[in-house]
Image (tube, rainbow, N blue to C red):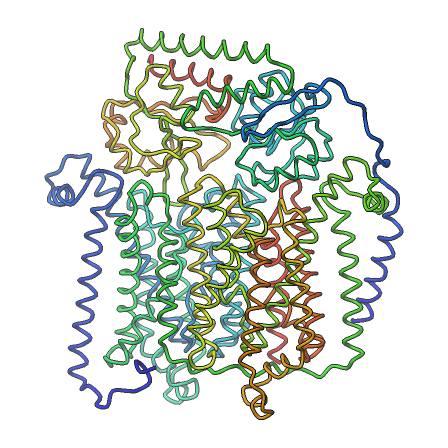
Amino acid sequence: MRRHLITAAAATAAALALSSCGTTEPAADDAKSADSITLTDGTGAKVTLKNGPAKKVVGTEWNAVESLISLGVAPTGVADVKGYKAWDSAVPLKNDAKDIGTRGEPSMDTIASLKPDLIIATTDLPAAAVKQMRKIAPVLNLRPADAADPIGQMTKNLDLLAEATGTTEQAAKLKKGFEAKLAEGRKALAAAGKDGAKYAFADGYVTGNQTSIRPYTDGSLIGAVNEKLGLKNDWKVKGDKAYGLGTTDVEGLTKLDEDVHFAYIGNKDDKGSNPFTGVLKKDKVWTSLPFVKKGNVHRLPDGIWMFGGTESMNQYVDSVVKALKK
Amino acid sequence: MAVTATAPATRPSAAASRTGAVAVTAALLLLVAALAVVDITQGTAAVGAPEVWKALTGRADTADSSVVIASRLPRMTAALLVGSVLGMAGAALQAVSRNVLASPDTLAVNAGSYAALGIAAATGVTLPFLASSGVAFAGGLLAAAVVLGLSGLGAGTVRLVLAGSALTLGLTAVTEGMLQLFPQETEGLYKWNQGSVAQNGFDGVLQMLPVAVVGLVGLLLLARKVDALALGDDAARGVGVPVRSTRLTAVVLAALLSTSAVTLAGPIGFVGLCAPALVRPLARRIRAFTRSRASLPVAGLTGAALVLGSDVLLRAVVPSDVAVAVPTGVVTSLLGALFLVVMAARVRDTAGAAQPDRLRIRSRRVFLGTTVVLVAALAGLVVAAVLIGDSKLLMGDVVNWTQGRAGQTVSFVLDTRVPRVLAALCAGAALALAGTLVQAVTRNPLAEPGVLGVTNGAALGAVLLVTTVPTAGSWTIAGGAFAGAAASAVLVFGLAARGGFGQNRLVLVGFGVATGATAVISMLIILTDPFNATKALTWLGGSTYGRTLPDVVPLALVLAAGLTVAVARRTELDLVSLDEDTPRLLGLNLSGGRFGFLVLSVLLSATAVAAAGTIGFVGLVAPHAARALVGRQHVRVIPVAVLLGALLVCAADLVGRTVIAPAQLGAGLMTAVIGTPYFLYLLVRSRR
């Protein structure tokens, strides 16, 4: 047994020594520099792009990826491509972007092998990981959300991405379109007599025999858009500081006003995310809620990413208007 | 010791005992009823005591009454059911194994059920509720069978807990790996793992009720035979009780009970261990409770009180909207851990320090041969770990890199990969060394920084620091980890020191502290940073993700110092690990040295945690394996154990980084997956 081990170890060592010589990349000789851009990212750090606007961009969080695509920049690497396709079909990936791993722990190796000009990270990543990414390429570290000013944070990130990729014109167009969409939505809702209507948006998850519901408070992006549409957010729970999300259960829904319009987004590819069309149909608490009895529950189309950018929010506005005008 | 050591001078008469039993049972029933009533007045809806009263008397409006009927009552019933079922399962398991540490948690029943559900979910088949509980039952039973089979029925506590906790770690790692490999299919499982008694209506409770009743009635019918087992196998056989079949039936019934709890609410930790332990002191006063027929239901009631009490306490302490996010299992773990620590410090510990493992004496040649093989294997592994990753490199790249001539991509890849490899190597070596020291000093084969709660204490210290000071650097984090590790070590060793590190007490206290620390970490992350799963994974799963060279420096320095000290004082270690008397006979006072070794091992585990999160198992496996390979002399054990530890964690890290690339599995998970089979093999082998 021991002899076999020794032989195996020796053979492995020899094989490694023999087969692993050579290089996968020639030794370095540094490249030229052109007109550079300097930006200040979400953490206040200065980011310099030596060769002008970035072309090969990697995004670790879906909201940045969505904004990039809306700006007309096809990202080279995207975290959790399958998940993005399932949850953000409002702004589909047009190119064959490389999967760089999970959103929480994107793979440094894969990112480095893509040789990006720019990496878009968010402060949700561990600081140590961002520090490592800085060695691969300049990193624009965004604040993914800010419950104090959700829409402002979203457009600030859009502007930053536009500057970094030289697409400021497109960004202006997107912002204008978004403003117009908000105004149009507000008008349509007012015309339908829904100005100031009570409204609550949530998503939910079924685990085992339990349902958790996640309220989108005023501090969430969707909550802020609702406000712009003239809807009155009816959630009383407190949201977190970044995303403005709360937690509650089915019981918690009894605190909503009886006239409330309740809307949610599920996902057909994700069985656990559709409690409102699934288990709750049989739940007495749910079925006895006044707004459920009145039929004021609206399922908005799948694939509108609740934490996305202008395009997702435009679709959201359209779908809310359509749902409430009924 | 005063509490337990002296039996009452005059035995209470049978009649008095019966009255006492009735009184205690009645008091418990009252407590459970009171907790149940309070429980249904708590929740996120504005339905308080008056509304509940109206609903129960049929005078409330439909909204309020549906909250009470479809949400509050099911939750309360589930808590009752889960608690009592777990309490009874634990009592039965402890009775048939004559082992105070036997419980659904320590026999890996819960972990087995969870793993079985995870595998079933990963295959993408949606199972109806009852079928999924069947799967869970099969998994739980299988795990219990493996643990009892490996440890031998009725055999020592040590072997049982070793096998059980090893299998629990391994199975949990498999399940968590599954969660990451099949995130879509298994999504629900992740949160469920925390254990919560909330329910959608009565469906689940009603489906599990018959199973629980079958288990309960079965156990009560078996009670007389189970009691006979308490006399010892031979005595039981003497009075005509079939020992083997009684044990088997009791274990099957207990597994059935605990899987019914697991399918209904997820793993609610510790209740099965605590409830019977709470009843045991009663049995010393009231003789009726020495009989299973009386003590089983009382353990059930105690379990129900524990679960309901946790639910009530949580909602009373934090606002209801926050309470929703905190799983009941976390609270029972916390309460249970606290209780376990207190109880362990008071209970009489009959098991002294263990016999040293019987090992063949190995020749010098064997030692040298083993070391050479291990060094060669480690060298090969390090080369592989540096070359293999999402992007494969070749030796020439590394040569270029060391000379600073590598191209951009190669430099980046190696700049990030090499620190991770180093962190894994050093963490493995440090944990192995820490384990060797602790096992020598306490002469306890179970002792390991992870089992003793030091690792989790370190993680808690680090998480506390990261949560309050987000900009903390690597030295500060290492400091935080050390503070946590030191605090937990002082607690564990301080409480266990009475009576000379009694084996059960040390492990009981350590186990309690470890679970408590884990629960507090989960709670901290849920309450401060609810949407940061990565943070939780790094600290609880053990991960080298995002490590840079400066992060490894504290660990490397402590490791170097530790190795120097350990090698320099190897003879002292040999003496300490032998027995209590030899050093004294030789006229040596070793308490100072012991303390020094303990401090060193705490330092080692703390810096390892700061660099790579909580990686279990290495400190337990490596020293055992080293002793099996080269004998007990520390001059040989230390290098071999350290090499093995480095090998194990480095391999785990490599596999974790590559197997589902570009996504990654934590090194801690992989260590458990690799370590479990080897450890179980060791257990089987050492039985001969």
Q: Can you give x and y, in whole percent of width and height, for residue B568 in the image?
A: 69, 75
Front one among A68 and A255: A68
* Quadrant in the rendering for residue B438: bottom right
Q: Residue furthest bottom?
A: B585
For the image, the number of numbered tags is 0
Residue B328 horizontal side relative to residue A171, left or right: left
The N terminus of chain A lies in which quarter of the figure? bottom right
Q: Can you give x and y, in whole percent of width and height, for residue A42 in the image?
A: 54, 28
Residue at the spot 30% in from the left edge and 63% down from the top edge: B303
Is residue B144 positioned above or below A47 on the image?
A: below
Q: Can you give x and y, in whole percent of width and height, for residue B670 in the image?
A: 62, 54
Residue B358 horizontal side relative to residue B59, left or right: right
* Quadrant in the rendering for residue A235: top left
Is residue A30 positioned above or below B47 on the image?
A: above
Q: Can you give x and y, in whole percent of width and height, for residue A303 in the image?
A: 50, 24
Front one among B196 and A144: A144
Residue at the spot 34% in from the left edge and 54% down from the top edge: B208
Front one among B584 and A92: B584
Is residue B90 positioned above or below B417 on the image?
A: below
Residue at the spot 62% in from the left edge and 44% down from the top edge: B546
Is residue B225 positioned above or below A193 on the image?
A: below
The C terminus of chain A lies in which quarter of the figure? top left
